[in-house]
Image (cartoon, rainbow, N blue to C red):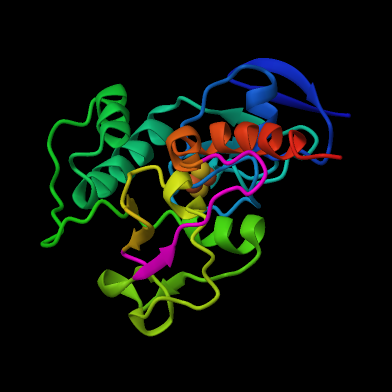
Amino acid sequence: MIHLTINDRSVEVHEDRTLLEACREHDIYIPTLCFHPALEPYGGCRLCMVEVSQSQPRPRLVAACVHPCQEGMVIKTDSEAVLQSRRITVELLLAGAHNDPGILALAEELGVENVRFKMPDENACVLCGLCVRACHEIVGVGAISMINRGISKEVSPPFHVGSPACIGCGTCVLICPTNAIKLQDVTSFRSIHPTASIYDRVYCQVCEDTDPSVVVFNDFDTLLEVETSHSDNHQG
Ligand code: FES
């Protein structure tokens, strides 16, 4: 175990924890966007910034979801520097997804009212990378990736053509925090946008569940629960 001071409170945590894990274990709130407990930390959105001082003369801001805990660290999760950093991040997120309820809630929480940045083509994708990582780490196919650089950066299958590796599971749809990826089940076809993928729908041959999407396409955690119980029914 190691010892930290978080917001003037002394706490003990295991040495292999990140700052985000340490704070969550002690019920200290840090907002996140690109973090998901089922995926490797990515450190992409910078919403989880906290202020850290240890032996450095001046405190510095680090992303809590990827920064490891070290003995003696002093952490502030709500200093003015931290809040200012989060406000700018939320402003940038609003530029790409200004109608998304989750981002709007964050803006309200942080008191962000004016947005100085605007994307000409609002598509709600905030490039958090959750869909790409879930496709790679959970589904194991890597059908989509981040392509291009700068303002042209986007999530796409190779060459904007539906990837033959994609199995149409919809994990990217479920994990997307801004609903930028859409799934449609129409008659016997399933389509996923903007990954340019269309599939024949398949049904469970054992329980004759004729439309599993009605049950499972609520959110990512629900999917994991339902998929587990669905599989259990078929054992033996
Ligand atoms: Fe830590 Fe996105 S949640 S950088």
Q: Position of residue 58 (x, y in %)?
A: 55, 42
In the shown orientation, is residue 156 left or right of residue 40?
A: left
Residue 61 visible here: no
| Residue 229 vs residue 29, the one in the foreground | 229
Q: Is residue 146 above or below residue 232?
A: below
Q: Is residue 149 above or below residue 98?
A: below
Q: Position of residue 198 (x, y in %)?
A: 38, 67
Q: Residue at x 56, y 37 (%)?
A: 223
Residue 42 lies in quadrant: bottom right
Residue 200 lies in quadrant: bottom left
Q: Residue at x 31, y 55 (%)?
A: 125
Q: Residue at x 89, y 29 (%)?
A: 1
Predominant secondary structure in magenta?
Answer: loop
Q: Is residue 38 magenta?
A: no
Which residues lie in the magenta part? 194-209
Number of dots carrying numbers: 0
In the shown orientation, is residue 52 left or right of residue 184?
A: right
Quadrant holding the C terminus: top right
In the shown orientation, is residue 22 left or right of residue 47?
A: right
Residue 190 visible here: yes
